[in-house]
Amino acid sequence: MSTTEKELRHDVALANRIIERFGLATGFGHASARVPGTNTFYISTRRSPGFADENDLLLIDNDGKVLSGNGQPNSEFWIHARIYAARPEVNGVVHAHPLACVSLTQIGQPHRVVHNMGGAFLDGVPEYERIGLIRSRELGDEVAQSLSTRPAVMMRGHGITTAFSNVRAATVAACFLEESAELQMRMLAAAGGDASKIRAFTREEAELVRDQTGPDAAARGRAWEYYAAVAAARPIGG
Ligand SMILES: [Zn+2]
């Protein structure tokens, strides 16, 4: 295994532990990374992402075949497999069940850019309306179609999936999206449920903050460093 692949496995395990430690997932949820230039990706086994271990990952291909590793993949691995198949430029995918994002889907409120960290989502976050788990290739293809060329999709009554150029950015984006949705929910409540009172950013404002705080840049800098440090310092049972 190359050094790069070892680093990739380290990042995948850490990304999984981050989404659990930061409340985006509990027993369920998963982060993955494509082996660059291939149709294969590393993903955690069928346990809470909080237990993910870089020496205990599975290598799967876009057709769902397990190529190496021990154990069963998470039942929703098709989300990852079919997004990698549809989006050659995507090398990192995170699927989680964060509460504020799920809440937005269930009150029919589309995501809006309401603070600096939401800028990456200025083109809108599409919704995948069908409820239930994504346990087949066909449903994985449906989610990938809903996502289209965007960086994230909300899944009604279920969760979110983010797709970026690397797993660090996908992880930071998932955290930013939930932070954004949480703020939007608070603003909506403070506004008495009147969404028109929320001063959502204009496109120009959103572009400005996207350039300043976008997950690709944040993943290279202090956002990933912070999330990684917290996850490492507070492991499950630690
Ligand atoms: Zn799920």
Image (cartoon, rainbow, N blue to C red):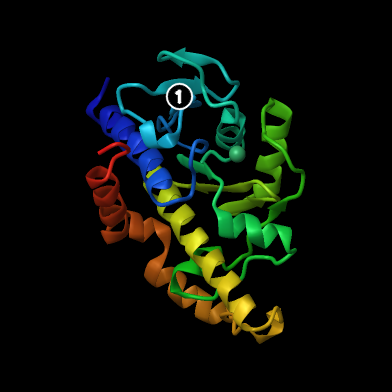
Task: Estimate the x, y position of residue 178 in percent, counting from the top left.
Answer: 51, 59
Residue 212: x percent and y percent?
A: 38, 71
Query: From the viewer's perspective, is residue 80 above or below residue 229?
Result: above
- Residue 57 place in picture, x, y as percent: 39, 23
Q: Residue at x 72, y 38 (%)?
A: 132
| Residue 200 falls in image quadrant | bottom right
Near-viewer residue (175 or 102): 102
Residue 95 versus residue 92: which sits nearer the camera?
A: 95
Q: Is residue 129 left or right of residue 91?
A: right
Residue 166 shows up from this direction: no
| Dot 1 alpha-carbon crowd within 10 angstroms: few under 14, some 14 to 19, many 20 or more | many
From the viewer's side, name the closer residue of 205 and 27: 27
Residue type at numbered disc 1: Thr
* Residue 7 appears anywhere in the view: yes
Picture coordinates of residue 14 (x, y %)?
A: 33, 39
Judge: label 1 CB < 8 Å from ligand 1. Answer: no
Residue at point 75% right, 63% down?
A: 108
Q: Which residue is mark 1?
A: 45
Query: Would residue 89 appear left or right of 79 to someone viewing this image?
Result: left
Q: Quadrant of ligand 1?
A: top right
